[in-house]
Image: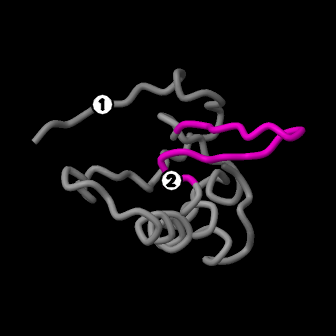
Amino acid sequence: MADTGGGGNSSYSVARLLAHPSLQAWNNGTLNKFPHGRLLLIGGDLAYPNPPAYTYENRFFRPFEDALPPPSWYNEDHIATNKLELPVGVSELKQLRIRVRTC
């Protein structure tokens, strides 16, 4: 999914289609049925470096939640919207050593 449009209505329309259990499309007189996907790759405006969290909230999460409410096991605390900014001189994430602190 990429570049769904410049507003909530177009994003919602695409999200609603993706929420269906399957999609049907005609091709040369034959009706093809496509099952619900198991993976969603997202490109476009949300893929650019470091958008603010409210951009994810308004342009991505809300249209999808409106189209298909999240499952009961969904936990908002498990969603990460802040991407790591690589230091000057580091071109790949694998070059960066990160210390993880546990609680």
Using the image, determine if residue 96 lies above or below residue 55.
Answer: above
Is residue 22 one of those drawn in magenta? yes
Residue at point 47% right, 67% down? 67
Magenta segment, which residues?
A: 18-35
Residue for badge 1 = 99
From the image, which quarter does the C terminus lie in? top left
Residue for badge 2 = 20
Residue found at the far right of this picture: 28
Horizontal placement of 77 versus 18: left or right?
left
Label 1's element? loop
Q: Distance between the residues labelled 2 and 1?
A: 41 Å
The amino acid sitting under disc 2 is His
- Nearer-the-camera pick, 96 or 63: 63
Residue at point 66% right, 46% down? 24
Residue found at the far front of this picture: 29
Horizontal placement of 56 versus 1: left or right?
left
The amino acid sitting under disc 1 is Arg
Label 2's element? loop
Tell me the colour scheme of the image.
one colour
Q: Where is residue 31 in the image (x, y as percent from the top left)?
A: 73, 40
- Label count reads 2
Which dot, 2 or 1, sits closer to the camera?
A: 2
Residue at point 70% right, 52% down? 2
Horizontal placement of 61 versus 41: left or right?
left
Using the image, determine if residue 22 lies above or below residue 56.
Answer: above
Q: Position of residue 57 (x, y in %)?
A: 46, 69
Is residue 16 one of those drawn in magenta? no
Classify mark 2: residues with Cα within 10 Å, few (<14), some (14-19) or many (20+). few
Residue at point 55% right, 52% down? 18
